[in-house]
Image (cartoon, coloured by chain):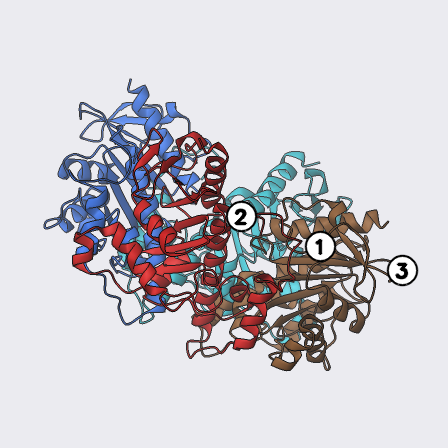
Chain colours: A red, B brown, C blue, D cyan
Amino acid sequence: MFEELKHKVWQANQGLFHYKLVALTWGNISGLSADRDFIVIKPSGVSYDELKPDDLVVVDWDGKKVEGHLSPSSDTPIHLEIYKAFNGLFGVAHTHSVYATMFAQANLSIPCLGTTHADHFCGDVPVTRMITEEEVNSGYEVNTGKVIVERFVKLDPLKMPAVLVVGHGAFTWGCSPQEALFNSVALENVAKMAFGAVLLRPDGIPFPDYLLRKHFLRKHGSDAYYGQKKTGDKQ
Amino acid sequence: MFEELKHKVWQANQGLFHYKLVALTWGNISGLSADRDFIVIKPSGVSYDELKPDDLVVVDWDGKKVEGHLSPSSDTPIHLEIYKAFNGLFGVAHTHSVYATMFAQANLSIPCLGTTHADHFCGDVPVTRMITEEEVNSGYEVNTGKVIVERFVKLDPLKMPAVLVVGHGAFTWGCSPQEALFNSVALENVAKMAFGAVLLRPDGIPFPDYLLRKHFLRKHGSDAYYGQKKTGDKQ
Amino acid sequence: MFEELKHKVWQANQGLFHYKLVALTWGNISGLSADRDFIVIKPSGVSYDELKPDDLVVVDWDGKKVEGHLSPSSDTPIHLEIYKAFNGLFGVAHTHSVYATMFAQANLSIPCLGTTHADHFCGDVPVTRMITEEEVNSGYEVNTGKVIVERFVKLDPLKMPAVLVVGHGAFTWGCSPQEALFNSVALENVAKMAFGAVLLRPDGIPFPDYLLRKHFLRKHGSDAYYGQKKTGDKQ
Amino acid sequence: MFEELKHKVWQANQGLFHYKLVALTWGNISGLSADRDFIVIKPSGVSYDELKPDDLVVVDWDGKKVEGHLSPSSDTPIHLEIYKAFNGLFGVAHTHSVYATMFAQANLSIPCLGTTHADHFCGDVPVTRMITEEEVNSGYEVNTGKVIVERFVKLDPLKMPAVLVVGHGAFTWGCSPQEALFNSVALENVAKMAFGAVLLRPDGIPFPDYLLRKHFLRKHGSDAYYGQKKTGDKQ
């Protein structure tokens, strides 16, 4: 079942490799079924060039495998926590893309320094607190998900479709597996731009809030005028 | 109409992707018709691998669509302001190429530190002032174009075929869509070289003006002797 | 003889090029036969696109050529020292991959700053002491091997399958030529991530030991649950 | 005439593009005929994907075109000065490769910090003095060649097959067009490694002279034992 969703999730996972966001098997994308009953996710540790649509794994909200001949990604509980807490998502992506991970390792949010950033993320991309030893021991992956959700108490996940997990990597999401992928592409690019800008200007760079909001709202929301008339999950 | 120009503009837009100057749909190139009556430009938000020559949009000097089944780039008014103010241009390119954008985000011009730069840009590549909130609210794109033009009051756009829009990205231009593209390629490369040179030598690097002028004039102007005898828009 | 092993070693050497870990002929991978009697290694100075499985060289534990029409890598004695000292290895890789070599040249270990690192290397990747002039003159390559082994007196090579040779480059290893290759891929990526994180945060970055151990043991050891059930040398 | 040499020079110029050492048309390689009577060089301003072996230009020692339907590279006089002053060369390459050019723009030699460097260049890669305004005006290209030669008064060009021209770019050479190309590949890689190492360790990094000499002599000179028995211009 879910052949179409499997194909979309497979294609988005191929995109991780195509856009050079992953080395080896370091990333995974999932998708939520239209009826919101099941999640389709990459199997654990399978390389992208060997991955076939039929290898994708279907799990329920408890993470129990419903269909598939392989084990799901060990990060599945993180994806589940994100879908549970953030309404309106149909795709979640996880990468260790190089420049985003530099910021995650440095325990720094990615500052919004330009319109490229503002086109996708409405503000600085937040970084979580460090997970505690107790949380690691009592369910590492599910607690990683909870730490992400905790970070968004005062944030709107639809306006900020990305997070850095400190000392780990990035998660992004969207209204489809493809949009989750595209937000990972955007995140890596704005991370690289911010990295260079910060090295050129270590004393800090102002970026006016009115320009941030203008660019985000030009592409998102009811008055958006960037792109063509809505055609499903095309960005 | 304008099948030939559409093809050239389409090819130049493909070049944005080929030369790795854009991620996703973050860039666009336009071309002015030989009779200077119409502008052909990339449609908004269409990815380069799906773009066909027939998707290109023809607009008049008011930005009104004259031909095409898609909406033109939301940056069209910026292109129009540039064509209006700078005589002799037949192509304009806009990118968020990574290293050029680092300088734009850092509110720094790209210093001319070598002959690679001087071969294409006769001096430091300028950065605009920040657009005001009022300008954003009263026509963001057209005012972005005006801010660019304002920056060139004392500059010759034919000797300096590039500008950084602070907190945003780069625009380049030329006597054809292809030359606009090539100037974007050159800009990204000299931005990367300058980035590294500045990190190696944060105290500043001298580059003599006589060498700058020699290299620029070796390739441009009436006494140029670089390249083969003129063959249209080939660089 | 050893056609299958030659093919595996050939494939792993091609991977050095495929994963952009080498320029020109700057790297080599070897494999140990299942009976632990012979080592198959890349010939010296042959480019990857010209290398054929039949060009691989078989040597014994004294480095004497047993089969092959070409001379073995000049680094063969280093490989041999590593196989002799570290039990359980069936593949060794040597690269001058760019970011790992930056750390080797700077005489710095690669600090463990995140889970990407901890997934592969259980702690900071160590750097050797500088080889002495006497050691260079009395058998440069064999002594380079001994300097590597010396560095592991208090380290478990199965938990730390990589080393930086100061002023030189990197060696990695594993239970197959392919795993040695994959550890070189991982090393280069974590080196790049650490490089950027260190530039963003020159004052040092903490990474908790409990998270390091959690991630390493999630992928390695008897309680590992990352990936699919063991299928030979697949990572 | 010189069909074979033209093919070799053409192939080496294609390599500039293949190894990502050039953008647009920013580089050129020449070869000297076996009888040392003629130089074959890339035509000026022709892009690599359009270049055909038959487009290569043959010039004599005065730079006069002897054969070819296009104008030779405007850098031809620089190549000629190098061939005239340095005995034993049969290939010269010129690039603006990004990391080598960063050092040239920063007016810094590329420090020898490791064996990758020492395998190809016997010491720090030197940078020239700045050309004077008078030299620019009285024959820019020929004087650039003379400035390079002047820098080698106390250096052996066969042990140091590369130079940085301050504020400009790099020249490399060798016993064939291919070796000149390979030295450009090596130069760009060691420049990138040095760039990163210097950022990680701005206070300076020691590299012992005995290891430098060991590595250079392992690959070059009468006692070299790296690679296979000599087979012409294969590295």
Q: Residues within 10 Å of mark 2 (few under 14, many from 20)?
A: many
* Earlier-in-chain disc, 1 versus 3: 3
Relative vertical location of residue A219 with respect to residue C232 in this rendering, above or below: below
For the N terminus of chain D, the image quarter is top right
Q: Amino acid at mark 2?
A: Leu
- Which chain does tag 2 point to? D
Q: Quadrant of residue D138?
A: bottom right
Q: Residues within 10 Å of mark 1 (few under 14, many from 20)?
A: many
Residue A137, image x, y percentages: 16, 52
**Residue B76 seen in the figure:** yes
Element type at mark 2 = loop
**Residue A8 as seen in the image, left or right of residue D118:** right
The label nearer to you, 1 versus 2, is 1
Q: Amino acid at mark 1?
A: Lys
Q: What number of labels is visible?
A: 3
Q: Which residue is mark 1?
A: B42
Q: Which residue is mark 2?
A: D89
**Residue D34 seen in the figure:** no
The label number, if any, that marks residue B35 in the structure image: 3
Residue A199, image x, y percentages: 43, 71
Q: Amino acid at mark 3?
A: Asp
Estimate the spatial distance between the alpha carbons at disc 2 and disc 3, rounded to whole Å: 53 Å
Residue C37, image x, y percentages: 18, 24
Element type at mark 1 = loop
Element type at mark 3 = loop
